[in-house]
Amino acid sequence: MRFKIILSFLLFILASGLAGQTDGFTKFIEFKGSKLTFEEVIAGFEKRMDIRVQYDAQLVSPNKKYDINYINVKAKTAFSDFLAHNGLTYSLQGNQAILKKQIVPVVKPMSVISGRVVVKQSGEFLGNAEISINHRKQVVYTSDAGYFSGFLNLDTNYIEINYPGMFAVFDTLSGDRNYFVNYSLEFMSESLPEANVKVITPSGEYVPQLGRSDQHFISKSRIKRLPHLLGEPDIIRVMSLYPGVVGGSEGMLGMYIRGGASDQNLVLLDDVPVFNSYHLYGIFSIFNDDAIKSATLLKGSFPAKYGGRLSSVVNVQSKEGNAYRIKGSVSFGLLASKIFLEGPLIKNRTTFTIAYRRSYLDFMAKPVTGLLLNNDSIQNNVYYFWDFNARITHRFNSKSRITASFYTGRDVGGIDEKINAQNTEFNATERRKQLSSWGNVLGSIKWNYYLGKRTGLLIKAHITAYDYSFNQSYQLKKKFKSSSQLDLDDRTEYKLQNGIQDREVSASLQHKAGEKLSWNLGGGICQHKFIPGNRTFSSVISGNETEYFFNDPTVTTPEYFGFGELNAIVMDHVYLDMGLRISSYQVLKTFYYILPEPRISLRYQLNDFSWFRAGVMRTRQFFHLLNNLTLGLPSDIWVPSVVRFKPSLCDQFSIGYSYRKKEYQITTEVFYKKLKNILEYKDNAGYVTSGNNWEDAVTDGSGEAYGWEIMTEKTRGRFTGWLSYSLMWNWRQFHELNQGNKFPSRYDRRNNIYIAGVYRVKKNFDFSFSWTYNSGFAITTPIAKYLSPTPQDPYREIYIFGDRNNTRTRDNHRLDIAFNFEKALKNGSRIWSIGVFNVYNRRNPFYVNLGYSASGERVLYQVSLLPILPNVSYKLNF
């Protein structure tokens, strides 16, 4: 019995000693220092772990100095890591660690770091954030869901997380295990004192997608600070200031990127294609800046997961919503007002955002026309637009979430005229309406699930539709004063509707196979539905009703696609991105197009500051927009590829160089693009608004574009901004046009210069400006005329036209400025923005036409759309 008691007592004493040792080794410590001797480092560990360390001085170099940086690391891990760097290990004897030579090194596989990056203020996931591991030896980027994955070395690993306009976050991790971590980044503008506005990450500015000089990332802060038209910040207007992007006519936002047409841009809202991305006939985009988080413009070798368009990808991501509290804003401008709300439905689990915007041109026009016209005649020039965004995100856990997004918007424009008259027999009301309406509707659901630390699954489904309708009606009502006569109510109405709809289901699997290799595989099916023209005529005359339908047949064409992407570091400083997309497009029941689209991009890191890039890409487009190339009307119809007109094809070759050091960045690229099977209206062909015989109105041909782009940018400091220049040639050739000879495209604008900048005067006040210059667009003008030999001929002067697009309009240039005043309030902030669009009132051409001078002679005259326009807007954040 006595023996058992003594044994139990000894075991208790031993366990207590071991527990004391364990406490010192298992706690998390912080240990930082520079140029320390071995003895000083050991003393630091003894103090933090409450142990004594014994060693033979011959085991270490007496003159060697050490830099120590362990932050929130387990003491045992930090101690072992330091010793391993010196070829040492240790054994414990009581409360003493005895150092000795490490005889057998421990070999283990590389550990994995994975996790998410979120906004500290809102809990919203950050896509495209940069995670640098061990001083940029490995760089990875977060997905749209904020997820990332990378590999750690066996020793200490230094982690740095960057995102534009946010404070960098630093971390130090050992390589002894796998990690799943959440990093929170904080916006600079919401907490940065005025004296420190120049502060940013020590290692340099955020570099979007290393060495990819063909990509541009646009953050929310850049959108809201630059000048905007009539108080409406516009992400597409900001994009139009980048090299390689050519705008349409003055005021029009149609983007013609590297020689492509406006319908050749794949515009995405939360990964869902948008067919018409403009309001007000192209003056504003449909993207409400309150609901937008960021956007990316891809114009070179973009990944194989993108398809269906020839020239570019515009990927716009909306906000997910604040995970902690309800927030919102209201805005009032000269053109429109907006309201935005975001917040948690279930705290830290489910978030929502809603945004609504409406213009009030129609409300402003009604009282004006009422004053100008007498009481018996009312004529309203109707125009307004609105849009609505909504998004809900639910997080099941750290590895699974589901997102549902919705957008709808509409433009309505036309004339509503009402005339009242009376005499001794009756009172009459005559009403004429001519209204056009167009808009987008899109919805999507997306599930992100991470199967492991290195593998992610994405399943999504969406529907997107665009429609245009035209309604013309006439009504005559007579109310007779004599009861012997029946009242009259005659009506006639004509309706036209066309549109396009896509329904798609797809899935993709992303896997990081190693530190130097990752891949992405996916596929799906998309059903394209073309509504080329539904026309209805109805009338009620003397009580007799008639109705006629003239509907073109709806065309439905399925598209099946699959893609694979491989990203590899093939050798030191050499990065290879390869992709292949294969699409099968069904035209008839027994006729398919099966078409491959290879993509390849090679990047070489010359040194710490500069990169070289070369890329080759093939893209296809299976449907076409029949555009009149003048105004880009909303009634332009989409038509499918058919046996007669094959899918469009584009081959692009590009070579680029980028240099980034401290706050300065320079990127430059040269490119060559070859287009095939593109459509254009024949000479003297009628404008097509329905699908009836559209194939007879167009012809197919080829195109060629090439040029040079350069952009220099200052990314931090009180002043930030950029200067870009593009030199481009853009040609078209059609067998049935211009006698088969090559001619310049309408938007062959040779020289394009864009300058934009923001100067932060103080913490709550900044000044911004932008100046744009474009060579004139191409038009066709007559080169001679003769008088008709027939006196009765209504066309007395007959014109002879030379080559197509043989003349240029005058050059476009314009200066815009803006001042932003921000003031912090108790529960939010308010922002006043005051600016001037077209400061020196440049009369840039909207279009050019033939007319008569005051002396009766035929002359070319220019129509300009947007003169000098002041703007003011007020925004209240709460």
Image: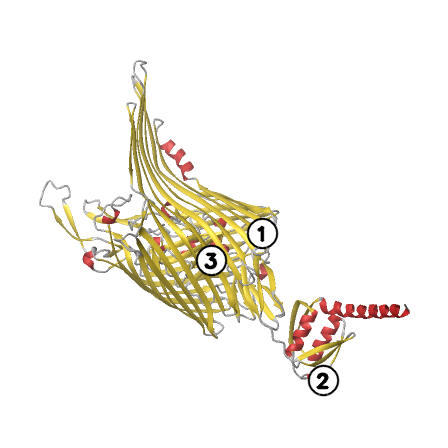
Q: Gap between marks 3 and 1, in whole Å?
A: 20 Å
The kind of residue on which mark 1 rests is Phe
Q: Gap between marks 1 and 2, in whole Å?
A: 55 Å
Q: Gap between marks 3 and 2, in whole Å?
A: 58 Å
Instruction: Report x, y in % for residue 589.
Output: 31, 50
Secondary structure beneath dot 1 equals strand
Q: Nearer the viewer, residue 54 or 400?
A: 400
The kind of residue on which mark 3 rests is Ser
Mark 3 or 1, nearer chain start: 1
Secondary structure beneath dot 3 equals strand
Could you say which disc has been placed on residue 57 in the image?
2
Foreground: disc 1 or disc 2: 1
Relative to 479, does residue 719 appear above or below in the rendering?
below
Could you say which disc has been placed on residue 396 in the image?
1
Residue that mark 3 sits on: 508
Q: Residue 33's quadrant in the figure?
A: bottom right
Relative to 9, does residue 561 appear above or below in the rendering?
above
